[in-house]
Amino acid sequence: MSITRKRMGYDGVVLAAPASTPYERYSVETAHWWIAKALRESIKSAGLLPRDIDGFSVSSFSLFPDTAVGLTQHLGLIPRWLDHIPQGGASGPSALRRAARAVQSGDANVVACVAGDTNHVDSFRRMLSSFSRFAQDASYPYGAGGPNACFALLTDYYMREFGATREDFGKICVSQRENALRNKNAIMKKPLTMSEYLLGREISDPITLYDCVMPVAGAESFLVMREEDAVAAGIPYAHISATIERHNAFPEDPIQMRGGWAMDIDELYEMAGHGPDKIDILQSYDDYPIIVMMQIEDLGFCGKGEAAQFLADKDLTINGNFPHNTSGGQLSAGQAGAAGGFIGLVEALRQVTGTADGTQVSGANTALVSGFGVINYDRGVCTSAAILRGNN
């Protein structure tokens, strides 16, 4: 049975109070500590108290043995609506759309959406022990203990199939580093040239050092509430124009060259009332540059295999004609675990509310955010996206 219904909009629901903790390469603190730090900043900036938060959404890889349930007691919250989003890099837009529906329906008045992780010296080893069963059964026997080898296969296939070069990927990495230099919280503090990128040491052919994110400790947070309450509080806020979410898209593809965005992009733009030509800023998930290329294509900016050509005459920096990952993204600001799924959304919220400080894009009013997460042995399973709009 196939039933098509027009999805409801998000009228009257907004997001506000973005918060980012300064990232640290390694930390002795727990994920709980980092999440609490970001949550406190969001609550404080909105002029609220913890008792005002009656909805709570969490995404984290390193909370074990706790989940969002345990955090309610740890943080002294008493929510009547609770969610735990296990979608990694897709968690931001997914958390937003669930929280927005909760507020819209009256199940909660203010939902705090938080993502964060710690990064101990042995965090990567611990994470691998709880990776997917697919990965354990199909990848580990070949010595692939993490995502690098998986994304190397995707990158190699894309280069062979569509003729992309390392310089094409390098443009993304170099541009994001330039943006990160204007973000006080970014881990990477030194410029990156194309020659330095090309000389980066090999990690998993054809992926080299600067194609990979830097794992860090940190957290990101925002609040979802009614527009009238944000106005009463006198805080900047953004409207939710559209959202989409998809899981296990195109399972018949022998290797992943498209994600769930391609299935739902028409609905995203129909809901927003415009196409990609009206997007002022793109914040894409960027654990590897190949995934950035995939999103640019699947989000409708160009055809499949055409991202390198599309970006050839684009300036991806803050002052450029195609501002992209203006905070530096994960590739240069750092990947704080599941907070990597929030960093683009929190930056987009700042951009469209004119509160991005050093990374602010002049005249930015509409931002597209996309998420990608949960890599199994051969592909990422979760995809999401959201379009935010300011008040201009």
Image (cartoon, rainbow, N blue to C red):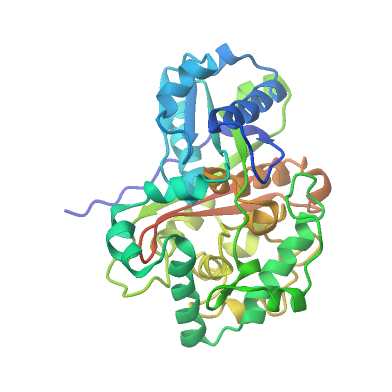
At 64% from the left and 30% from the top, the residue drawn is 38
Query: Is 273 placed above or below 356 here?
Result: below
At 50% from the left and 39% from the top, the residue drawn is 96
Query: Is 273 placed above or below 256 here?
Result: above
Label total for image: 0
Report the side of 235 relative to 13 (left or right).
right
Q: Horizontal and vertical percent for residue 353?
A: 73, 40
Quadrant (top left/top right/bottom left/bottom right) for the C terminus? top right
Q: Horizontal and vertical percent for residue 273?
A: 54, 54
At 44% from the left and 27% from the top, the residue drawn is 68
Residues 380 and 216: in front is 216
Residues 299 and 137: in front is 137
Report the side of 258 relative to 118 (left or right).
left
Q: Please say whether residue 106 is visible from this viewpoint.
A: no
Q: Tell which residue pokes out farthest to the left in this image.
A: 1
Q: Please say whether residue 261 is visible from this viewpoint.
A: yes
Q: Where is residue 213, by image quadrant?
A: bottom right
Q: Where is residue 181, by image quadrant?
A: bottom right
Q: Horizontal and vertical percent for residue 350?
A: 71, 42
Query: Is 99 placed above or below 365 here?
Result: above
